[in-house]
């Protein structure tokens, strides 16, 4: 049940929350215009030295760039922000989803290496912990910097994909990138879409789905952190997560004094006296609409401020002296375009724990959907010890495009199974496979990602340590 929605309805505060930009789709922020303009300065410079270009430097894009480069491809990673890590750093998501199947680690290869290295940024965590390990975002950025640069891949920050030029209906010729140089065309043989939103593939004409049958997506969250928390009281006080039915968050929500907060309240000690939160919801934000995103950033910061005031009231000994030290530079977007591949991973595949001939790794995360009337975790349950399902290579190959792969959360799934495959450990795994496959496509199949030798890909992934049954 969405306690907050119910509460708002009862108290008549729902209208106010919408007015404050909570239901951002409904707010209709996109300006409508029929007007157009033809660019007069059509000639732009070209950088065509690349074998593989990856757009988006989140978990999926980082492992894609690292593995493409290690496989011998001259690789460029283009990122809109000034740091790598996507939602795990710029978006301030404070914990890794479980890496184990409750017996052993199952996201291996580059995923395991990055995960292990990131643990050095949270030395207060048990070294052997595999599940829900906290993230120190500043440290994780440097881990990605190190892995990507050491692989030989080049990184271009503050550079945003603005448009895609096609040489045929199914083939990308160049990416138009906007940055401080203005517009530049970047050319490669194979491109990897790791934008999370699937910008690259969608703009190249790939078919995709978004959210449910009405296009309604999972809620977003603005993550944030408090500094100067009293760590002793935090650690020894009540569990604040609302898995604890006595969490003081319930009192704060019930009080009605903080209308923007709700009972989604994950919190992690990420360093001395610093607690980072994945808390609150922004309903149905269209992350491909810059106006909706802009409003969500503003409302998200208001939500964070209300959580601080609420915690200072209900847990004064822990949070009385704390302050809001940082909010995400990226909105925490859970749900956006799912680019349709040669195969769409389904709810039934997840339920049956299916294994595939062309799988490139395994996943066992539960169906985690943040939507009032969305698929329910309780309905699907969690996998048991040692259980996992395969991730088919065909989910990374957009069916309409020849020289494009997807990595991370924009791969090909249905709405339900997306709730599982969207989190960081499987994103790291799909990234590594996509990067490797891109390099193989250049050598094996004239850049056609659909004709890659999958057995060879699996052999190489195994050599790099990836887990298969
Ligand atoms: C609030 C929230 C909580 C979560 N909690 C957890 C959790 O506890 N544990 C966990 O493991 N996972 C969690 N997840 C899921 C996980 O963080 C993301 O799904 C995952 O990071 C997706 O990885 P990605 O590489 O596909 O994309 P992202 O991490 O979204 O990264 C995409 C990158 O692409 C860049 N980009 C986008 N468009 C362009 C463009 N046009 N040009 C250039 N660059 C572009 C962005 O700046 C960004 O850096 C959470 C997600 C959210 C939103």
Image (cartoon, rainbow, N blue to C red):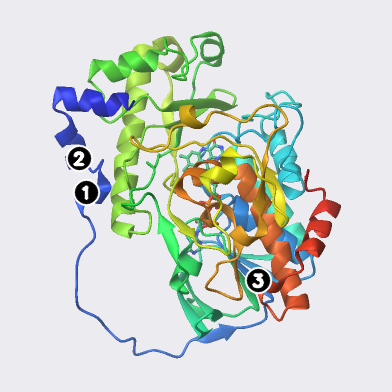
Figure quadrant of residue 113: top right
Q: Tell whether 327 sits left or right of 12.
A: right
The residue nearer to you, when weighing 234 against 287, is 287
**Which of the image's four quarters has the C terminus?**
top right
Distance between mark 2 and mark 3 Cα atoms: 45 Å
Image location of residue 98, percent across then percent down: 64, 33
User: Circle 3 sits on which residue?
Assistant: 450
Distance between mark 1 and mark 2 Cα atoms: 8 Å
Which mark is drawn over residue 18? 2
Is residue 160 in sight in this rendering? no
* 367 versus 275 height, above or below: below
Tag in front: 1 or 3: 3
* 68 versus 379 height, above or below: below
Figure quadrant of residue 261: top left
Query: Among all residues in the image, which is located at the extreme right?
Result: 463
What secondary structure is found at the residue carrying circle 2? Answer: helix
What secondary structure is found at the residue carrying circle 3? Answer: helix
Tag in front: 2 or 3: 3
User: Circle 1 sits on which residue?
Assistant: 26
Number of callouts: 3
State which tag comes first along the sequence, 1 or 2.
2
Q: Do the residues bearing badges 1 and 2 touch, measured as CB atoms within 8 Å?
A: yes
Image location of residue 342, percent across then percent down: 58, 64
* 378 versus 291 height, above or below: above
Which mark is drawn over residue 212? none
What secondary structure is found at the residue carrying circle 1? Answer: helix
């Amino acid at each position: 049940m969405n306690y907050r929605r119910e509460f708002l309805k009862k108290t008549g505060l729902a209208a106010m929350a919408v007015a404050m930009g909570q239901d951002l789709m409904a707010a209709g922020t996109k300006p409508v215009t029929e007007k157009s303009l033809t660019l007069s300065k059509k000639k732009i410079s070209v950088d065509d030295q690349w074998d593989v270009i990856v757009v988006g430097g989140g978990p999926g894009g980082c492992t894609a760039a690292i593995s493409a480069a290690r496989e011998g491809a001259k690789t460029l990673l283009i990122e809109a922000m000034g740091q790598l890590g996507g939602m795990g750093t710029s978006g301030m998501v404070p914990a890794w989803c479980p890496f184990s199947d409750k017996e052993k680690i199952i996201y291996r290869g580059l995923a395991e290496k990055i995960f292990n290295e990131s643990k050095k940024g949270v030395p207060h965590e048990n070294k052997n912990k595999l599940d829900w390990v906290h993230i120190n975002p500043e440290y994780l950025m440097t881990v990605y910097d190190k892995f990507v640069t050491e692989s030989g891949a080049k990184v271009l920050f503050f550079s945003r994909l603005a448009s895609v030029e096609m040489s045929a209906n199914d083939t990308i010729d160049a990416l138009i990138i906007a940055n401080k140089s203005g517009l530049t065309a970047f050319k490669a043989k194979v491109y990897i879409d790791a934008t999370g939103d699937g910008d690259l593939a969608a703009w190249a004409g790939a078919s995709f789905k978004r959210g449910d049958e009405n296009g309604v997506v999972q809620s977003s969250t603005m993550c944030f952190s408090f500094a100067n928390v009293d760590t002793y009281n935090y650690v020894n006080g009540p569990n604040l997560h609302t898995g604890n039915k006595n969490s003081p968050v319930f009192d704060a929500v019930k009080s009605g004094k903080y209308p923007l907060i709700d009972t989604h309240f994950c919190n992690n000690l990420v360093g001395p006296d610093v607690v980072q939160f994945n808390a609150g919801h922004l309903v149905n934000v269209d992350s491909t609409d810059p106006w909706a995103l802009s409003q969500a950033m503003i409302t998200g910061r208001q939500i964070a401020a209300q959580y601080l005031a609420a915690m200072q009231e209900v847990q004064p000994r822990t949070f009385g002296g704390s302050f809001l030290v940082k909010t995400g530079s990226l909105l925490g977007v859970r749900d956006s375009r799912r680019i349709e591949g040669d195969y769409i991973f389904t709810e039934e595949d997840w339920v049956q724990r299916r294994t595939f001939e062309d799988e490139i790794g395994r996943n066992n995360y539960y169906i985690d959907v943040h939507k009032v009337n969305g698929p329910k975790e309780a309905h699907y349950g969690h996998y048991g010890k040692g259980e996992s399902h395969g991730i088919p290579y065909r989910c990374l190959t957009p069916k309409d495009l020849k020289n494009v792969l997807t990595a991370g959360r924009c791969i090909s799934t249905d709405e339900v199974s997306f709730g599982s495959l969207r989190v960081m450990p499987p994103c790291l795994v799909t990234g590594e496979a996509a990067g490797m496959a891109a390099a193989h496509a250049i050598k094996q199949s004239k850049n056609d990602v659909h004709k890659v030798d999958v057995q060879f890909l699996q052999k190489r992934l195994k050599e790099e340590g990836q887990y298969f049954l």
